[in-house]
Amino acid sequence: MGTVSYRLRINAPREEVFELIADVEGFRRFSGVIKDVRSTGPRRYLWSVEIVGIPLEWEADVVEFDRPRLFGWQSIRGVYNRGRYLLSPLGRESTLVEFELTYRIGNPLVDRLASLLSGGMVKAIYRELLDNIKKELEK
């Protein structure tokens, strides 16, 4: 089981940041590893990603939704993961995004690689995602 966390200041109001984070189906435009995200029910999404050439899938429910402060999910099948984004205002026009994720990929090769890299690969994926959200909002 791995865990990653990441903090990032985004120079945009918390409401705008939350809207992009809550648009789960739009995530694929922010990361090259995300191949598809589609809704399978109210606040439920099927994810397809490819990490180091290995396709992975999971379905997750949004389990925490407190606009514009908190967005969290829990996988219900496939790759185990549970995570959340906590958004705190930094004045009127900036937001602190605190991200945390617990995961177990389930593929021994990828799990071992992720462990050897101290979660660096998984953290890099989410860092890319949040950095690209930041770029989108700070245009």
Image: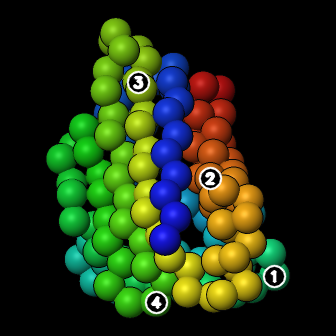
Q: Which residue is mark 2?
A: 123
Residue shown at the point (22%, 65%) measured from the top left: 63
* Cα distance in 3D space between marks 2 and 3: 20 Å
Q: Secondary structure at mark 2?
A: helix
The amino acid type of the residue labelled 1 equals Gly
Residue 13 in sight: yes
> Which badge, 4 or 3, comes first in the chain's sequence?
4
Q: Which residue is mark 4?
A: 78
* Cα distance in 3D space between marks 2 and 1: 17 Å
* Cα distance in 3D space between marks 1 and 4: 17 Å
The tag on residue 95 is: 3
Q: Is 22 on the left or on the right of 42, as rendered?
A: right
Image-quadrant location for residue 131: top right
Q: At which x and y percent is residue 75?
A: 36, 78
Q: Is 32 on the left or on the right of 131, as rendered?
A: right
| CA neighbours of label 2 inside 10 A, class few (<14), some (14 to 19), many (20+) | some
